[in-house]
Amino acid sequence: MSAVAAGDPFWSAAARALHDAGAVPAGVLAPLGFCRYLAGAREYAEGADLFALAGAQAGWLVVHKGQVSTLPTAALAAVLVDARLIFANEVFVVFTLPPPARRQDPHVGAFQARLRAADATAADPGEPADTDAPAPAGRRLGRLARRVLHQIPAAVGRRAGAVTVTDTAPTLDHPVSQACTQAQFDTDAYRYWCGEIREAPRHHRKQWEFCYILQALGEAGMLAPGRRGLGYGVGAEPLTAVFAARGCAVVATDLDVAEAQRIGWAATNEHAGELAALNARGICPPERFAANVRFRVADMNAIPEDLRNFDFTWSACCLEHLGSIGHGLAFIENSLATLRPGGVAVHTTELNCSSDRNTIDHAGTVLFRRRDLMALARRLASAGHELRLNFNLGDQPLDLHVDAPPYAVDGHLKLLLENFVTTSFGLIVRKAG
């Protein structure tokens, strides 16, 4: 991301908040003149229809308080459905936006407003809710308004804790729980995060996992100063350093050295032998890294009970190595106990692309089936947590190619493991609260 330009302190502060939160400039919708402070942002004029402008690309919205009265109210309200405030000062308010599917159509919003008005003007608080006597037309409309208003949130997909399953082409701009597909590599978000982890973009699922986790947490507003993150099985991955560079306080965990050597992680450079290795690429200034990161030993099958009240938690390609499908699913559920209400967990793992029946279980690497993840989603939803699933596997050339040993360093999205085709799958869970 381009450096934030100096100038008006209120404009610079809003741009700095977006920068620190990991916003991709092309996904920022902001008032005219904002590009001076954040190059590449998409600008809008007074009176703009923000719902139409947001489209599928916008993940961040900057609103100038002095211009609110010029914006179409229904469109502004529609685009802010389920949005999260991440910054405010005397001039601006800044939001992260939900995926397009979760934004409410402004026509529905206008209809709701009329119904609320009917309810407010026609309802008689002294009258019982149900009566056999004929009611005046206004009162009947008030009762109808209450019934319809109660139904609308579920109809537009906003019910808290609901399990939503889609099969549209997944996007990295607004990730949900989804598979690695070729189209996600050809995005500004993917190129941006590759730059942040100091890697050249390539079509490799492990690199995708890092970018996916960063984008998911960035869109959730978690990559900001003061946020607390907890990582599992961090190995030598670059994510800890990216989080620390943005001011997050991170607890990075991994197996103890003896156990890592026993199962072979240390030999394959998948274990964090020392804290300095987590910043080997120089992503974070050393003094900031030392202030923001601490390391401790932790077993993912027995999470220490003192690890609590984090804003976010993550793991990259670890939970399939916990001994069984059951252990992996239990870890996902147990990881939520470490989060504060409303916190976000992002994990990547293996998805069996060949079968929803036969798979690899009780082995060093297990393959999760669609039905395993659906069962998990139902349990999480019943507890009030939010998980949105997309099982679309893509239809571009690399989505149809299956890599076989010895695996390639590029063109490696799906691979053959024993007799099964597998790929990386990301999971995003927002804790109830």
Image: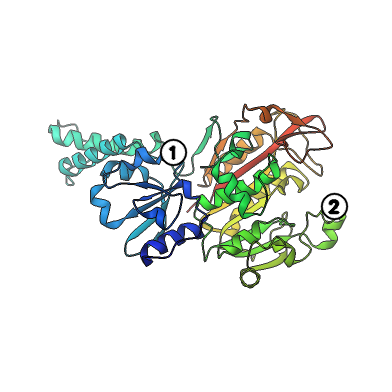
Q: Secondary structure at mark 2?
A: helix
Q: Which mark is residue 179?
A: none
Residue labelled with disc 1: 100
For residue 361, which quarter of the picture? top right
Q: 356 or 402: which is nearer to us? A: 402
Amino acid under disc 1: Pro
Amino acid under disc 2: Ile
Residue 282 image position (x, y, % from top left): 68, 63
Residue labelled with disc 2: 263
Q: Secondary structure at mark 1?
A: helix
Residue 416 image position (x, y, % from top left): 78, 32
Residue 27 image position (x, y, % from top left): 46, 46
Residue 407 image position (x, y, % from top left): 80, 38
Q: Does 323 sit left or right of 126 as displayed?
A: right
Q: Does 252 sit left or right of 387 as displayed?
A: right
At 49% from the left and 58% from the top, the residue drawn is 19
* 304 shown above or below 291: above
For residue 252, which quarter of the picture? bottom right
Q: Farthest residue toward the left?
A: 136
Badge 1: residue crowd in 10 Å (few <14, some 14–19, many ≥20): some
At 18% from the left and 33% from the top, the residue drawn is 140
Between the residue at mark 2 and the residue at mark 1, the CA separation in whole angstroms equals: 43 Å
Q: 58 or 415: which is nearer to us? A: 58
For residue 255, which quarter of the picture? bottom right
Q: Does 287 sit left or right of 102 as displayed?
A: right
- Earlier in the chain: of badge 2 and badge 1, it is 1
Badge 2: residue crowd in 10 Å (few <14, some 14–19, many ≥20): few
